[in-house]
Image (spheres, rainbow, N blue to C red):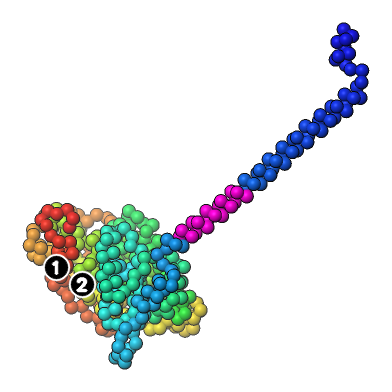
Amino acid sequence: MRVLEDDLFPSTPGKVKIERATAMNRQLHRCFASTSTMFLWALFLVAMTASYLSFQSFVDTSSKYFAASWGGLHWERQIRASASPRRPPGSAAGAGMSVLVTGAAGFVGTHCSLALRKRGDGVVGIDNFNSYYDPSLKKARRSLLASHGVFVIEGDINDGRLLAKLFDVVPFTHVLHLAAQAGVRYAMENPASYVHSNIAGLVTLLEACKNADPQPAIVWASSSSVYGLNDKVPFTESDRTDQPASLYAATKKAGEEITHTYNHIYGLSITGLRFFTVYGPWGRPDMAYFSFTRNILQGKPITVYRGKNHVDLARDFTYIDDIVKGCLGSLDTAGKSTGTGGKKRGPAPYRIFNLGNTSPVTVPNLVSILEKHLRVKAKKNVVEMPGNGDVPFTHANISLARLQLGYKPTTNLDVGLKKFVKWYLSYYGYTRGSKNL
């Protein structure tokens, strides 16, 4: 037992204490050494992570920079060349304008850009080429514009940096703002796109114009849709526009209020144009006359809406050439903006005009005219008009535009649709029953 006790309890307890203390110190040292090592590794990992994130951010930024469809000396030279007026010296029409056209690859934008270039004005276009309808049609329009010396930038009017750069490169005298999310019924499917383009995009553009030096005069596309549920005909600019029937109409009405605000506060010269059912060559595929033509040629039925009490819907169809005359007349008569450095120096013009044909035609008559020019009978499904934001009729009073712009439409629906059908058959070709038309 003694040996066991001696083994269990040695006769030199002080030595045991020292050895225990030394062992504990070793353990503590190892622990601290291990902790320090872990801390250093943690710092190393944090540094590596930060470096990676910084590098990734640099790569992303660089990729965006290099992938951007705008910027650089060559791009700036293209912009300046396209924006330069080309009117002959001493021209009776003056030196010419330098116009930024938004939505330039759109239906109205293409025609207006061509007309401006044809008479010698400088034109630069911008378009985001979205997929609301077939982008290939928009790209074909861009090719048409390029063949006439008009440069179109692929970009979005919500890109404030791009707009600021454009005004830095070129002192535009005018802006023709035609970019918008169009269509009454589509607003029920994608309402956010209307707020993004028709309100946010408009404000971004107005901010760029406000800060530009010199400030340009602005002509922009409102819509006859702002008359909404108004039943007083013909529609006059002074009529009520506070009862919109669709979100599209509401965004256009909001645009009129927003542009008035920028006119009042910042001295921007503003002209709003209320278009009435524009049609013609290079038109929008979502429009009734366009889709009717496609379906009639394919032998597919068309849906013809009818109003309450079996009343036929009617529209004030306006041919594209007449609309172009109204747009150019508005640019020519637009007074100058009065602001400098974002500050108003005096009152600037604020105008709104109807641009229509003043001769409403029922949808069944439209179909009959198409049948005549296509030489094909339509298969019609006549149904009651759904509550999707459409209104039963439109009819423009153009007295104000005639007085102040010299606006005088000259193309009736029969002549206009004949020209459209000719373009359609040429552009798409025609094979009976083809699904590509």
Residue 62 in the magenta stretch? The answer is yes
Q: Main secondary structure of the magenta part?
A: helix
Expressed as whole percent of the image width and height from the top left, the position of residue 77 reads 40, 75
Residue at the outermost top position: 1
Identify the secondary structure beneath mark 2. strand
User: Identity of the amino acid at label 1?
Assistant: Lys
As drawn, is 20 to the left or to the right of 319?
right
In the image, what residue occupies the spot 26% across and 83% down? 406
Work out whether residue 262 or residue 420 is closer to the camera in this orientation and state it.
420
Expressed as whole percent of the image width and height from the top left, the position of residue 151 reads 33, 72
As drawn, is 41 to the left or to the right of 136?
right
Mark drawn on residue 23:
none
Residue at the outermost bottom position: 90
Sequence-earlier tag: 1 or 2: 2
Q: Which residues are magenta?
A: 47-64
Q: Residue 94, located in which quarter of the rendered image? A: bottom left
Q: Residue 87, located in which quarter of the rendered image? A: bottom left
| Spatial CA span between label 1 and label 2 | 14 Å
Residue identified by numbered label 2? 319
Identify the secondary structure beneath mark 1. helix
Residue identified by numbered label 1? 422
**Residue 82 seen in this snapshot:** yes
**Residue 178 seen in this snapshot:** no
Work out whether residue 348 or residue 138 is closer to the camera in this orientation and state it.
138
Relative to 349, say whether 74 is above or below.
Answer: above
Q: Quadrant of the N terminus?
A: top right
In the image, what residue occupies the spot 11% across and 57% down? 431
User: Identity of the amino acid at label 2?
Assistant: Tyr
